[in-house]
Amino acid sequence: MNAIAIRRATSDDLEQLTPLWQMEGLAADELAPRFTEFIVAVDADNRIHAAIGLNAVGDQGELHSEVIGVAENGDQLRSVVWPKLKLICQGYGLLRLWTRLGSPFWRAQGFHHPKPAIAEQMPGEFGVPDPDWLVMPLKGSDALAESVDRHMTMLRAMNEAETERTREMARRMKFIAGILLVLVGAMVAIWSLVLFRVLPGLKDGRFR
């Protein structure tokens, strides 16, 4: 294979891209207006050997519609395209990449099936969630998300424990207040009884 250069697709590339898309059974008429999403691998004669789309939505990206001119050169071409894709992702500030591309090459780069909590964050513009989707964190975003989740879970547990301690203290204070109220009531009753018995004697002069 001759020396390969990697660049963004232009409208002039549609003449070559369209038959490649059709060869892979892709909807060429839908992809043509999106040609600016594509990265192409070309030789010195500007012949396209491979192309792949990168759709960015917010801080999420999707690799899609991969086409390889000669299947035997697939992984070699992917290994040349991938560094360029990573640079573009960095320029876009993407935190996570999604794909349904089935080549083992992409799994070898770190793509894997997402956990349910991560799968829920896939933008709807990429399609409907299904088991074929793979994800790859960029800049340690998923590790950070999991760390934040663990931290939040710990905080919730601590808050629940603190709330329970506060409730237990309130129950104890209520119990103690009840006992004090009973004691005060008993003391008042005793003093009332004493006064009830003593006051008549004071009036009669018996305690002079």
Image (cartoon, rainbow, N blue to C red):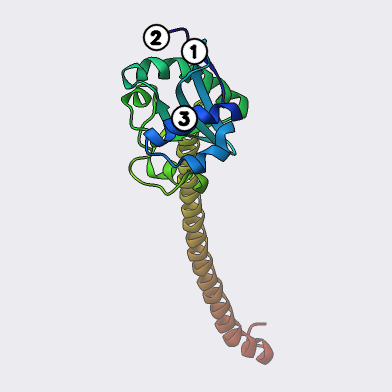
Q: Which mark is residue 43?
A: 1
Say whether residue 136 is visible: yes
Q: At 48% across and 47% down in the image, what residue appears? A: 156
Q: Which of the pair 148/73 is nearer the observer?
A: 73
Q: Which of the pair 1/191 is nearer the observer?
A: 1
Whole-Å distance between the Cαs marked 2 and 3? Answer: 32 Å
* Residue for badge 2: 1
* Residue for badge 3: 137
Disc 1 + disc 2, Cβ < 8 Å = yes
Q: Tell us which disc is closer to us: 3 or 1.
A: 1
Residue 34, image x and y in percent?
A: 56, 37
Q: Is residue 101 left or right of residue 142?
A: left
Within 10 angstroms of label 3, few (less than 14), some, or many (20 or more) residues? some
Residue 80, image x and y in percent?
A: 45, 15
Earlier along the polypeptide chain: callout 1 or callout 2?
A: 2
Disc 2 secondary structure class:
loop
Vertical relation: 103 (above or below) 4: below
Q: Which of the pair 70/208 is nearer the observer?
A: 70
